[in-house]
Image (cartoon, rainbow, N blue to C red):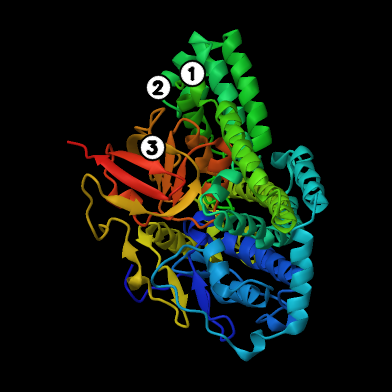
Amino acid sequence: MTEHDTWVGDSELGERFPAWTRGNAADVFPDPFSPLGKSMVLLMSLSPGLRDAYIGLGALNYDEFENPDAPDLFKMFGGYVYNPLTLTRVLGYRMPGATPEMIDKAFFDDKDEVPPYDHQDWHDSPDNDARLGESMAWAMSATELPMLEADRDMARAQRVNRPDLSTLTDSALLARARSMVPLLQQTFENAMTVSSLASLGPGALSAVCEGLGDPSLSIRLLAGIEVDSAAPSHAMWELGRVAAASDAVSAAFADGPDLVLDRLRDTGSADAEDFLERFDAFLFEFGSRAQNEYDIYASSWEIKPRIALAAIDLMRRSDESQAPSRRQAASVAERDRVLAEIREKVAGDPETAGLLEAALGSAQQFLSGRERAKTNTITVINEMRVAIREFGRRLVERGVLDEIDKVFMADNHELDRLRHAPQTIVAELDARWEQFRKLFDRKPVFIVNGRVPELSEMTLRTAKASGTIEVGTVLTGSAGSGGVATGRARVILDAADPEGLEPGDILVAPQTDPSWVPLFVPADGVIVDVGAMGSHAMIVSRELGVPCVASVTDATKLIPDGAVVTVDGNAGTVTVVSLPE
C-alpha cells in the first residue's frame, strides 16, 4: 500500500459538515468497513435512519442535510467509519440548555486534536430550538419506549421466520438481504432517537450530585440498569455452570474453543447432547452478535462461535462470586443505598427532588433503551449478513470466488454483476480484498476536518505509544462504572482470542463492542482505550457491576501485560501497583 493509495469505499467531504471524528465510532465501528457494508448498511440504511431521527427530534430540517435524498452521514476514510462531529454539534447548539461542548463530552472521546466548535449562521433556528425542547421534555418524562418493543418483535420475527437459505434461488437470496434495508433504516432511526436523548438523564443526575458536593455519586446511581447487550453474558454464565458440573463437557473444553463442539459431538454422552442443545438455543437467541457487528462482513457468533465458547470456558473456570447476577445485585444494592441518602438530603427541596426522580427515570429508560435499540438493529443486520454469506458460499462452490468473504468486496449494485457476469468483476474484488486486509494494520487519524487524509497519515498499529509508566503512575480516563479493583492486567486485543485472561484479572481492551461483554464477567475490572460517557463499555459494566475506566489513551500499549493495577471506576483513574519482572 503506497501513500497515494485510496480505498474504494472512502468518502468525499462537503462544505456544510466538515468535521468528522472517530470518537465513539472506534467503539461502534472498530475495524475497517467492507464495501458491501458501506453500501447496504451505512449508505442505504443507517444514514437515512440518522437523517430521519434528527428530523423527528427537531434537530435539523430535511433541506439542511447535504444531499438529503441520499445522505452520507457516516463517512469513511482509510476504510474506517467516522461519526458526524459537525452535525452532532448542531444538535448541541440548538438543544435548549446544552452546548456543542456538552455534546462532545457526552458522546465523543476528549482528545487534544478535536477542533473547537465553528458556529455558522444557519445553525441559529428558534423553530428547531423549540422542537428540540419538546423532545427533551418527552425524554425526561417518558415511562416507556413502545417503538423499541415493536422493533424487537419485528427483528425477532425475521430470525424466527428465516427460510432455509440453502433452498432459495440466488435471486431470492439477494432479495431477502435487500428486504432488510427498510427494516434496518427503521430500527436505526429509533436507535438514534433514543441515543441522542440518552445523555439528558445522566447529565441531570450529575448536576444534582455536583450540587451536593460529590459529582462521582452519579456514576453509582447509574449502576445495575438492565440492558439487552448484557443478556448473553448471563446466558453464558449458565452454560458455564452446566459445563462445570459435567466431567464430559469440561473435558471437551480442555483443547480450546476451536475444537470443543467437535469433541462434544464425538462423545455422544447425555451431558454433551444436553450442552449442545442448550448452546444451539443460545446461538438462536444471541448469535447475531459479532465484533464490528454493524458490518455485514463480520462473522457473527452464529457463523463463528469461538468468542462465545471462549467466554463460556472462562466462566466455567470462575467461582460463584463472579456470577453476573450476584455482581449486579451488589451493584443495585449500592445504588439503592446511595439513592436513599441523596433522597434524604434533597427531601426539603421539592425542585431538586423532582429533578432527581425525573433524571433517574430518564437515565434508566433511555440507557436501557439505547442498548435495546442496538440489539434490534444488529438482529436485522445479521439476517442481511447470513443471506449474503450463503450467496458467497455458492460462488465459492461454483469456482467463481476462492473465499466467501470476498463477496463483501462488492457493493450492492455490483452483486448483480457478480451474479450474472462474474468474470467482469472478480479480479477487482480480489484486488480490493488484498488492500482491505492491509487496512487492519493501520490506525486511523482521530479527526478529519475539511480535508480528506491520505492513507500515509494512518500510523501502523505496531507503533509504540508516547510516554512510559512506572510503579505509582496514574493514568486518567473517564469514570465509567463505580467500584475499585486491584489485579493483574491482561491486555487483550481480540475478543475472539482472550489468551491469558483468567478469572479475577483486569481486562485491558482497545474498545468494547458487545462481543467483548462476556469477557467482563470473569474480570475484576475493565480498562478501555476509548469511550465517552455513553459508551457501550460504561453502560454494560454498570449493569454487570464491574469497575470500569474508559478513554484511557493508549492503555493497551502503555500498560504491560501482567502488571498489577488498581482500577478506580469512581475517580476514573488507573494506578500502576507493580510491573512484571
Q: Do the residues labelled 3 and 2 touch (CB within 8 Å)?
A: no
Q: Residue furthest left?
A: 581
Label 3 vs 2, first from the N-terminus = 2
Q: In this view, does 262 lie to the left or right of 58?
A: left
Q: Residue 506 carries which label?
A: 3
Residue 414: quarter of image: bottom right
Give SS at disc 3: strand
Which percent across, then down, holds residue 141? 79, 56
Which percent across, then down, holds residue 379? 68, 46
Question: Which amino acid, by three-letter code, is at mark 1?
Answer: Arg
Disc nearest the viewer among 3 and 2: 3
Q: Which mark is residue 480?
A: none
Cα distance in 3D space between marks 1 and 2:
9 Å
Cα distance in 3D space between marks 3 and 1:
31 Å
The residue tagged 2 is 255
Point out the image quarter for the N terminus.
Answer: bottom left
| Other-residue count near label 3 (Cα within 10 Å), few / some / many at <14 / 14–19 / ≥20 | many
Disc nearest the viewer among 1 and 2: 2
Label 1 vs 2, first from the N-terminus = 2
The residue tagged 1 is 263
Which percent across, then down, holds residue 137? 77, 64
**Residue at image x 38%, y 45%?**
493
The total number of labels drawn is 3
Which percent across, then down, holds residue 431? 43, 63
Cα distance in 3D space between marks 3 and 2:
24 Å
Q: Do the residues labelled 1 and 2 touch (CB within 8 Å)?
A: yes
Q: In this view, does 267 lie to the left or right of 281?
A: left
